[in-house]
Image (cartoon, grey):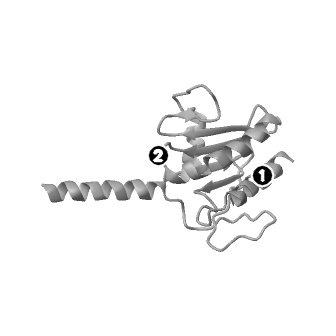
Amino acid sequence: MKKIVTLLLILALTVTITACKPEEEPGTINIDKEVVPGTRTFEETGDELCVEDGKPLILEFSTTWCPHCKWIKETYQNVVNEYVADGKIVAYQWELDINDNMLTEEVEESLPAEHSAIYQKYNPTGSIPTFVFGCKYSRVGNGYEQEGNLEAEEQEFREILDELTA
């Protein structure tokens, strides 16, 4: 019985770690910079721009327990909050395990159906973090976490947001 319990715990841990692990394939977009081989950049989706209140809709999907999500959280928040304050975008940061938008003071407790549909469309496997910028660009996982480079993350966020709001 102990062996079965041990195997189940190992399996559960493996599934948890794998679910949070970002994709290994690099994306196709390279906005005015040289990309380190193996780095995951945003991919162009070829889709129409999705908007809310006439502004590009920017979404990140994460959880409270994912270490990759925690690593990028503050950088994402700082960048999108700046663009929101300037009236350029509408942004959300959904923590899926509690259904709360971390960019607001209130506790939402439910993910809007249209945001859930976007998450499922751009990441049908349900990995986190997942970024969808205006439905024109998406990325599963952090692009520069392996190098510990939050400045590169911020630069890429800004480059895409500048393109979407030009």
Mark 2, Cα crowd under 10 Å, few <14 / some 14-19 / many 20+, is few
Residue 137 disc label: none
Question: Which residue is at 78% across, 62% downward?
Answer: 31
Which amino acid is tagged 1? Arg
The image shows residue 105 at horizontal and vertical percentages of 62, 27
The image shows residue 107 at horizontal and vertical percentages of 55, 27
Of residues 79 and 127, the one drawn nearer to the viewer in this rendering: 79
SS at circle 1: helix
Mark 1, Cα crowd under 10 Å, few <14 / some 14-19 / many 20+, is some
- In the image, is 71 to the left or to the right of 11? right
Residue 9 is at least partly visible in this image: yes
Question: Which residue is at 42% across, 57% downward?
Answer: 17
According to the picture, the residue beneath numbered tag 2 turns out to be 65
According to the picture, the residue beneath numbered tag 1 turns out to be 158
The image shows residue 26 at horizontal and vertical percentages of 63, 67
The image shows residue 52 at horizontal and vertical percentages of 73, 34
Question: Which residue is at 87% across, 48% downward?
Answer: 166
* View extreme (left): residue: 1
Above or below 15: residue 57: above
